[in-house]
Image: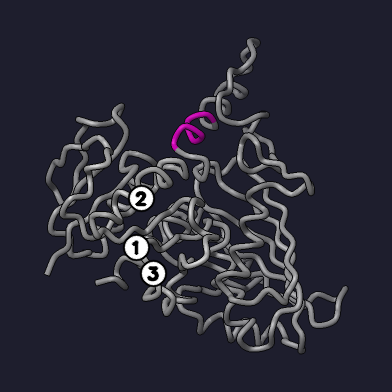
Amino acid sequence: MGVNVAVVGVTGAVGTEMLRVLEKRDFPVDELRPLASSRSAGKNITFRGKEVQVQELTADSFEGINIGLFSAGGSISREFVPYAIEKNCVVVDNTSAFRMDEGVPLVVPEVNADRISEHNGIIANPNCSTIQLVLVLKPIHDAVKIKRVVVSTYQAVSGAGYNALVELKNETEHILSEKSEEFNRNIFPHQIAFNALPQLPQSDAFLPNGYTDEETKMINETKKILEDSSFRITTTTVRVPVFRGHSESVNIETRVPLSADQARDLLSKAEGVVVIDDPSKQLYPLATDAAGKDETFVGRIREDDSVENGLNMWVVSDNLLKGAALNAVQIAEKLL
């Protein structure tokens, strides 16, 4: 039996991926209702070989809709999710609007699918960088309990939306063509091409404690998903000139010893995780290889000689798929 599905923000980078994932996974869509702003209303999108016209998102958009996949920004979710719930539409929200709200499950299905049933109309999709992190932390935490985590991220520009991809492409071409005039950037506060920016998001990022909003999201979301506030976690998030695929350097300190081989064994058995770890053959996860793939990849697993019970690893995942669209659709599948 099919269900009626609305995709909010359907013309954006994540919304476009949601359509592809729904189609690829043969999600039982009876009616697809593509929703976007008035600027995109009237355009056609293709779903399962048929053209479907994009409708303008309004308070009345959710009549008869069973599941709403939202990825149009936090302010849009805060305004329109209540209208969806009024119409008995269950929302899977890909923004930060409700993630830390009490009573709203924050879900990575391979980690805490059991929380989905506790929803009151909203299930939150975690931050893209959080999702790939908890997929590798969960089996280790279950086995030996984590004491402390230190994470540095190297995040693709697609995480900032389609216009960020265009800006990177144009700025790269501008620099390589050695044009004398200054490049006019609209998305990033500094040059992103051939650079690394330790600031996410692009504006209003820094909090009074010096952390960015993105770093704080990762810290708080990880503890909520793993349901443990006893371990310590610190993050540094960096935007890099990569189109697609987030990479993370992860240092883990555990409460009891866990060897690199034991960690590889645990992670190789973890759902949704693939171990690529053969340095002798220069085999390790790469963003270019992870792009377009559903799994989260981990490698460079080694013991940290600087601390007792320490491990280092390198974690890579497609931020638009497992980091956003795929995780949302996997949640929706659990609602069927």
Q: Is residue 98 above or below residue 314?
A: above
Q: Which is more toward the observer, 297 or 119?
A: 119
Residue 258: quadrant of the picture: bottom right
Left or right, residue 23 beside residue 285: left
Are the residues at dot 1 and dot 3 in contact (C-beta closer than 8 Å)? yes
The image shows residue 218 at horizontal and vertical percentages of 62, 59
**Picture residue at 24% right of the left edge, 31% below the top:** 41
Q: Is residue 207 above or below residue 334?
A: above
Residue under label 2, please give it: 81
Q: Amino acid at mark 1?
A: Gly
Q: Secondary structure at mark 3?
A: loop
Q: Is residue 79 above or below residue 273?
A: above
Residue under label 1, please give it: 121
Are the residues at dot 2 and dot 3 in contact (C-beta closer than 8 Å)? no
Q: Magenta part of the protein: which range?
A: 162-167
Q: Amino acid at mark 2?
A: Val
